[in-house]
Image (cartoon, rainbow, N blue to C red):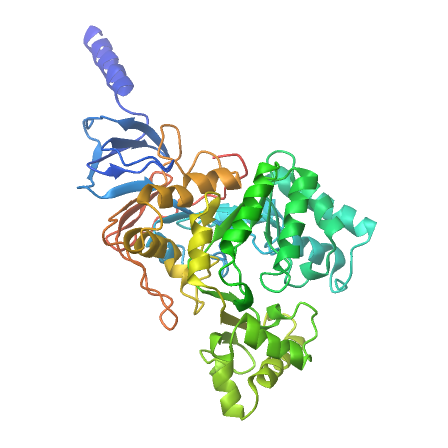
Amino acid sequence: MRTGFARTAIAALLALATPAAASTLITGAAVYDGTGAPARKVAVRIEGDHILAVGTLKPRNGETVIAAKGLALAPGFIDAHSHHDAGDYKDRGMPTLLAQGVTTIVVGQDGGSAGPFAEVAAKYAARPAAINVAAYTGHGWLRDQTMGADYKRHSTPAELAKMQALLAADMKAGSLGLSSGLEYDPGIYSDHAELVDLARTAAPGGGRYISHIRSEDVAFDAALDELLDIGKQTGIPVQISHMKLSIADRWGEAKAVLAKLDAARASGIKVTADVYPYEYWHSTLTVLFPKRDFTDLAAARFALTHLTTPEGMLLDYYAPEPAFEGKTIAQIAAQRGEEPAVTYLWLIGRAQDWEKAHPDAGEAESVIGTAMAPADIAAFLAWKHTVVCSDGVIGSRHPRGAGAMAKILRYYVREQHLLTLPEAIHKMTGQTAEQLGIAGRGVIRAGYKADLVLFDPATITDHAKVGDSAALATGVSRVILNGQTVYADGKPTGTWPGRFLKRGQP
């Protein structure tokens, strides 16, 4: 009996000495912790889904050791404005994102969320992917649920109250806040008072307001003033989605815009922004018609002269005539033997007719428009309160979905020296988490979740371009999500430990 007792005691002591969960130690990395601090030569221990310790650490018996051999170790990158949820995570491995080191995407953007937050989160939890997801509640979704097809007007008090109730339920369930897309239907028809009242509903408990503002070109100043006033009236943090000056007449004015934002911050308005590193946007053919008159030839001519060019408008998707996809308005106009502005209006009209004939098929068209100046993009990226986004989607001809984060590290860090590596990582990790209300992630620190990327700063490169937009980035060695390796040896591992994140909760 004594022998049996001794064996039991020894087994109990061994159990106490053994970690509760398998641990992994990453050694030999240059650790960029996501705060903007310089790299440190420290080891990082992961246990379960979190970081257990950071410092001078020795391997435990039986512990998995990852020898980084001088590679950079950073928090997993957070895409502050993403549409990668389109397609419902058909490829759960998400190689487009993992090849760039992205571990979290923020969706529900431009006013378009996929449904009640609790339902969307539950659906993802039942079939997760190899990525974390956080979400805003879309203003457009609120209007759809409340006003239906009768949206080309201001809301009534009763309709606003219903929208507020839907938003309040989403906020309670963990939504990051309210997003709007005010250049798009149905948000374009809302008035300022509606947005202020909805922002007040979202503000308690750390909610945010993020907006594709009413104009990124002709009426940019008024659109920016509207966003700032929402922040002033409600106290809610306000973020400019994919900040840009997409009007040739105002190229070079980024510094003046930033001076205005700095003054707003000095007055107490908590304004921030996100930016993607490309000179061309991806939207609809109709977005350049704020008056929504798609028979206005003068407006079409103005758009193709001041806002972009016929050569700079490339059809990404065109359901009525798929043969037009990959062609510019200039090319289609030459094919039809007519003025590009006439072709522009014809393309819109045909797409709208197609949508009427296929009411359940979604939008009939999308376009890539070249409209920004490189110097303005650089100035916006360098602003202290800007974070990085892709605004990307899987399957588009726009390369940002597969290249944005890698391009930041290749072009703006390694080649242009606009940002230092610690600054860029901070903008893609810790700063993003702080600005968006994502807790317990974005920093390499004990107790934080183990979302990590191991990469080579000297070789990380984006390869996606128009015409080959799905080309994967290279230079990322390993991606760890919630403590599990999801990407290694240039491909996803087939594990899907992604989580749907709630505001303020890790």
Please tell me which residue is depicted at 48% across the width and 43% down the height of the picture. 385
Above-or-below relation of 231 to 472: above
Q: Nearer the viewer, residue 9 or 472?
A: 472
Please tell me which residue is depicted at 62% across the width and 65% down the height of the picture. 218
Above-or-below relation of 207 to 241: above
Residue 171 in the image, given as x and y percentages of width and height: 63, 40
Left or right: 94 in relation to 45: right
Above-or-below relation of 306 to 424: below
- Asked if residue 280 shows in the view, the reply is yes
Left or right: 52 in relation to 336: left
Question: Image quadrant of residue 122?
Answer: top right
Residue 503 in the image, given as x and y percentages of width and height: 55, 38
- Asked if residue 135 shows in the view, the reply is no
Left or right: 306 in relation to 22: right
Q: Nearer the viewer, residue 357 or 338?
A: 338
Residue 169 in the image, given as x and y percentages of width and height: 67, 41
Quadrant of image for the N terminus: top left
Query: How many tags in the picture?
Result: 0
Residue 261 in the image, given as x and y percentages of width and height: 56, 46
